[in-house]
Amino acid sequence: MDFQQSETYKNLLKAYEAELLTSAKFEINADIAQYETYIEIRNLFMFTANNNRQHARIWLRKMNQGNLPTTVQNLLESTRIETQMASDMYQQFAETARREGFLEIAALFSGVANIDYFHAATFSTIYENIMNEQYFCKPVNVLWICLQCGNILSGECAPLICPVCGFPQGYYKLFQNVY
């Protein structure tokens, strides 16, 4: 039997989605508890949210024969999901809300669609940069900042190892002082 056509796979997918949903809900609950100054209850919600996220990771690994998707795979999938949500789901939701006279909600759906288009474009650009080997190297000198210690260097490529804190290249990003 093809695993992805099995009821077991479908159940794994449902469990994965349910754990992600409850994890996000518990994080929102934690924010509310913190706002209301119930700090220990906030901690409980965050603890439970993390547990649920780990359960989701278990189910995702099982759905992928013991592996988690790579960052490149996640970027492609995220681009697809955000584009679909922006162009299909939120546009349809906005139209329905407008038709039913809920103009404020329609505007919110349209606004979130625009945000999701931005997310999709960002994921897509990063994917292209990785595929073209231009994520940590650019064709011109740019400024790079270490996310661990704040070291700023100029060059075509981020250093393989930060000369200040010793963290690897993955902790560098383009420095853009746009404040």
Image (cartoon, helix red, strand yellow):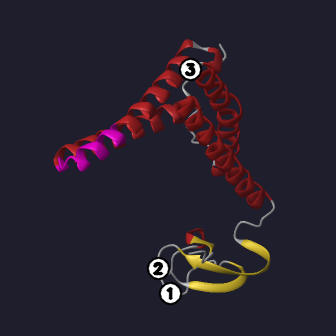
Q: Earlier in the sequence, mark 2 or mark 1?
A: 2
For residue 164, the mark is 1
Identified by mark 1, the residue type is: Val
Query: Closer to the camera, 16 or 143?
Result: 143
In this rendering, does residue 74 appear at all? Answer: no
In this rendering, position of residue 102 left or right of residue 123: left
For residue 149, the mark is 2
Q: Is the residue under label 1 in contact with that under label 2 (CB below 8 Å)?
A: yes
**On screen, residue 112 above or below 59:** below
Identified by mark 3, the residue type is: Tyr
In the structure shown, which secondary structural element does the residue marked by tag 1 occupy?
loop
Does 38 lie within the magenta span? yes
Total numbered badges shown on the rendered structure? 3
Marks 1 and 3, how far apart at CA? 47 Å
Identified by mark 2, the residue type is: Cys
For residue 9, the mark is 3
- Counting other residues with Cα less than 10 Å from the Cα at mark 3, is it few (<14), some (14-19), or many (20 or more)? some
Image coordinates of residue 162 in percent, x first then y, are 56, 81
In this rendering, position of residue 66 left or right of residue 18: right
- The segment highlighted magenta reads 26-39
In the structure shown, which secondary structural element does the residue marked by tag 2 occupy?
loop
